[in-house]
């Protein structure tokens, strides 16, 4: 997990998101075997690299956390990633949220939040 600030997170996310939206509009999976497949000629290598960078990033604010969850949501909707980066990204978001709400108390993110909110 990359805990260093990724100065290009939002531009990288926007590029990834726009490409994902284009693929959705074109119906990527439905056109895969068709001669009309506009995605066949599209080089998705940069999108895959962008996704890997995004999923390895520890969010530093709520906007990044929300965007990171969108990457994970789309991966889970597509049956998840075989390398587990989507699950690691969820842990990163949970950690950031726990740190923001409960401070660095140690332990698992959800446990920290629960300890902080105990009555």
Image: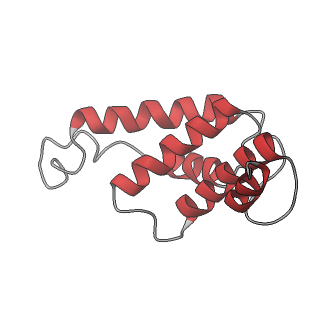
Q: Is residue 112 left or right of residue 15?
A: right
Camera sees residue 44: no
Q: Nearer the viewer, residue 101 or 45?
A: 101
In this rendering, is residue 42 above or below 61? below
Q: Locate residue 81 relative to residue 95 in the image: left or right.
A: left
Q: Quadrant of the N terminus?
A: bottom right
Q: Is residue 32 left or right of residue 55?
A: left
Name the quadrant containing residue 6. Answer: top right
Q: Position of residue 109 (x, y in %)?
A: 72, 58
Q: How many marks?
A: 0
Give the left or right position of residue 85, taking residue 17 as reference.
Answer: right
Work out whether residue 25 or residue 109 is closer to the camera in this orientation and state it. Answer: 109
**Image point 54% across, 44% down: which residue?**
69
Q: Nearer the viewer, residue 28 or 39?
A: 28
**x, y percent for residue 40:** 28, 47
| Quadrant position of residue 91 | bottom right
Q: Could one spot residue 63 in this view of the protein?
A: yes
Q: Is residue 31 above or below residue 91?
A: above
- Identify the residue at horizontal 70%, vertical 44% (top origin): 97
Q: Position of residue 47 (x, y in %)?
A: 50, 45
Where does the image place residue 37, in percent across and percent down from the top left?
19, 43
| Residue under the image location 77 percent in, 57 percent down | 115
For residue 60, which quarter of the picture? Answer: top right
Q: Which color scheme does this rendered protein use? A: secondary structure
């Amino acid at each position: 997990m990359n805990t260093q600030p990724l100065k290009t997170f939002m531009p990288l996310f926007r590029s990834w998101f726009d490409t994902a939206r284009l693929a959705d509009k074109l119906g990527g999976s439905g056109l895969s075997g068709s001669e009309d497949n506009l995605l066949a000629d599209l080089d998705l290598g940069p999108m895959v690299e962008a996704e890997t960078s995004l999923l390895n990033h520890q969010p530093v604010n709520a906007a990044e956390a929300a965007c990171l969850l969108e990457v994970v949501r789309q991966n889970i909707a597509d049956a998840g990633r075989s390398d587990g980066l989507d699950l690691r990204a969820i842990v990163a978001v949970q950690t950031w949220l726990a740190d923001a709400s409960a401070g660095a108390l140690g332990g698992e993110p959800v446990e920290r939040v629960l300890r902080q909110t105990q009555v």
